[in-house]
């Protein structure tokens, strides 16, 4: 192979920017790579893979640093960071978006909006495009446009031997299938995506807040409404701890405010609300609001650290049927007995055009789910970690009769049968494709797909 050299912006221990370069979004983890290479071109990625193989150095791939278990970094290894590869191009007819895989969501949304288009991606401003897309990609436009991977048309990838390959429905179609829900770090390093563009201008959004006393009525009303309402409407329900004492639903509708008011009627009438806000706004303002920012606020700049980085343990599951009273009771019990006031559960509406494809059409298998559940715990002090992790895992376990499966982008190393939960009936085919493109398991991490 020869004496391959790393190219790009290289950071090593002792450099002034090493501490910032090694930081993860989940500050529960404190990892010390021996080298971090910020790739600027595809050739830098090729050189990084070849260098790691030649030196027998373990490596991980990183974009937005949002891996729940910090699998995008490691101790004493190489981190191949593609976050500086973020250029994009919108076709003249505004039907296609070509974008480098290192783009972060908010800056990308902002620039695309100036051209009147978007992609149906996630909400967190600093999430990386690559990990989100490869795991499926849920967001506030999901019920109308499907998962983000459903708008993916082609990609460029660096494989285990350092070769640059292209994948689409017509070329390397097996790899393309696997990359639509098979997760990052499994088959290679994606360096560029081609998406179908979504035209945007104004959208209607809502916020409804209820008191804790309406817990059962609100949860039941949301689950009976959110997966079945107009497909142009995607909603979430945040269920806070008893100490906070609130439930809050947010959502986005691709239509006028008056129509949204009518669609929300079943939810608003389920239990007397403390607050109801319904408004029509520019699409980019909705992006900022759902990302926890106010319109006009400065954009996130991960180059100066992520302001939302914190210690946490999240996990999740999918509900293919409505939660019965027993399931809602379990939710209420855990949120009434939470070790941290900041803990919560979020229900994310699915169905709609997510169901347009069958579970076998792409690697993303959870096509029949009505909604997903994200179980969230975060804390301030290190000594609080153990009881909060135990709390969130026990809640997931007790709700398994009503919600199972695992979302690839919600990595959880406490799920023993992770591969089966994440990939279901698609796992055998994914392992075959892994064996074809990475037989030596060069791209590996604790919850990765193994070759046969």
Image (cartoon, grey):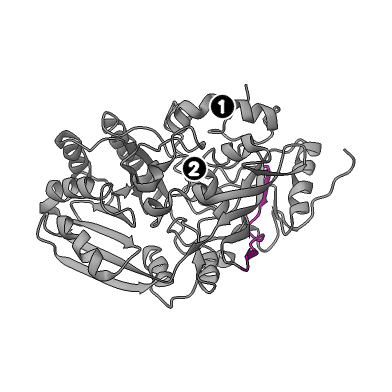
Mark 1 neighbour density, 10 Å: few (under 14) some (14–19) many (20 or more) = some
96 part of magenta stretch: no
Tell me the number on the disc at residue 429: 1
In terms of image quadrants, where is residue 387? top left
Q: Above or below — where is 404 with respect to 298?
A: above
Residue 22 visible in this rendered orientation of the protein: no
Task: State which region is magenta.
Answer: 76-92
87 part of magenta stretch: yes
Q: Earlier in the sequence, mark 1 or mark 2?
A: 2
Left/right of residue 209 with respect to residue 430 in the rendered view = left
Q: For mark 1, give the secondary structure.
A: helix
What residue is drawn where x is 34% and y is 38%?
A: 369
Task: Give the residue pinned by disc 2.
Answer: 69
Q: Quadrant of the N terminus?
A: top right
- Residue 451 in the image: state x and y as whole percent: 63, 25
- Residue 256 in the image: state x and y as whole percent: 30, 69
What residue is drawn where x is 46% and y is 34%?
A: 413
Q: Nearer the viewer, residue 237 or 221?
A: 221
In terms of image quadrants, where is residue 290? bottom left
- Residue 420 in the image: state x and y as whole percent: 45, 27
């Amino acid at each position: 192979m020869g004496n391959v050299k790393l190219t790009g912006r290289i950071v090593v221990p002792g450099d002034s920017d090493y501490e910032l370069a090694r930081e993860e979004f989940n500050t529960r983890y404190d990892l010390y790579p021996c080298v971090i290479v910020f790739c600027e071109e595809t050739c830098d990625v090729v050189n990084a893979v070849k260098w790691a193989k030649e030196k027998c150095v373990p490596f991980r791939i990183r974009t937005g640093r949002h891996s729940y278990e910090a699998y995008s970094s490691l101790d004493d290894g190489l981190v191949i960071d593609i976050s500086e590869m973020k250029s994009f191009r919108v076709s003249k007819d505004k039907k296609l978006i070509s974008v480098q895989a290192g783009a972060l969501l908010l800056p990308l949304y902002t620039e695309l909006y100036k051209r009147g288009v978007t992609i149906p991606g996630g909400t967190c401003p600093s999430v990386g495009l690559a990990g989100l897309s490869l795991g499926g990609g849920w967001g506030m436009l999901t019920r109308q446009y499907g998962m983000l991977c459903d708008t993916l048309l082609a990609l460029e990838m660096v494989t285990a031997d350092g070769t640059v390959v292209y994948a689409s429905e017509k070329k390397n179609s097996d790899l393309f299938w696997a990359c639509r829900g098979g997760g990052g770090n499994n088959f290679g390093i994606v360096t560029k995506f081609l998406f179908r563009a979504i035209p945007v201008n104004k959208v209607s959004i809502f916020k409804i807040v209820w008191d804790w006393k309406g817990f059962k009525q609100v949860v039941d009303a949301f689950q009976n409404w959110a997966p079945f309402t107009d497909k142009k409407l995607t909603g979430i329900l945040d269920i806070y701890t008893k100490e906070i004492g609130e439930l809050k639903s947010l959502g986005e509708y691709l239509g006028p405010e008056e129509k949204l008011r009518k669609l929300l009627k079943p939810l608003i009438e389920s239990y007397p609300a403390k607050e109801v806000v319904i408004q029509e706004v520019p699409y980019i303002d909705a992006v900022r609001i759902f990302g926890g920012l106010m319109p006009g606020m400065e954009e996130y700049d991960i180059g100066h650290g992520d302001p939302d980085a914190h210690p946490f343990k999240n996990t999740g599951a999918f509900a293919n049927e409505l939660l019965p009273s027993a399931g809602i009771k379990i939710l209420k019990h855990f949120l009434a007995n939470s070790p941290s006031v900041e803990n919560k559960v979020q229900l994310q509406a699915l169905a709609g055009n997510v169901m347009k494809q069958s579970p076998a059409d792409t690697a993303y298998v959870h096509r029949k789910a009505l909604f997903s559940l994200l179980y969230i715990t975060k804390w301030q002090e290190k000594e609080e970690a153990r009881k909060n992790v135990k709390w969130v895992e026990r809640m997931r376990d007790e709700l398994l009769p009503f919600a199972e499966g695992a979302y690839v982008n919600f990595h959880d190393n406490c799920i023993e049968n992770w591969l089966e939960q994440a990939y279901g009936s698609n796992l055998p085919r994914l392992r075959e494709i892994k064996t074809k493109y990475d037989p030596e398991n060069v791209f590996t991490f604790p919850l990765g797909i193994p070759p046969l």
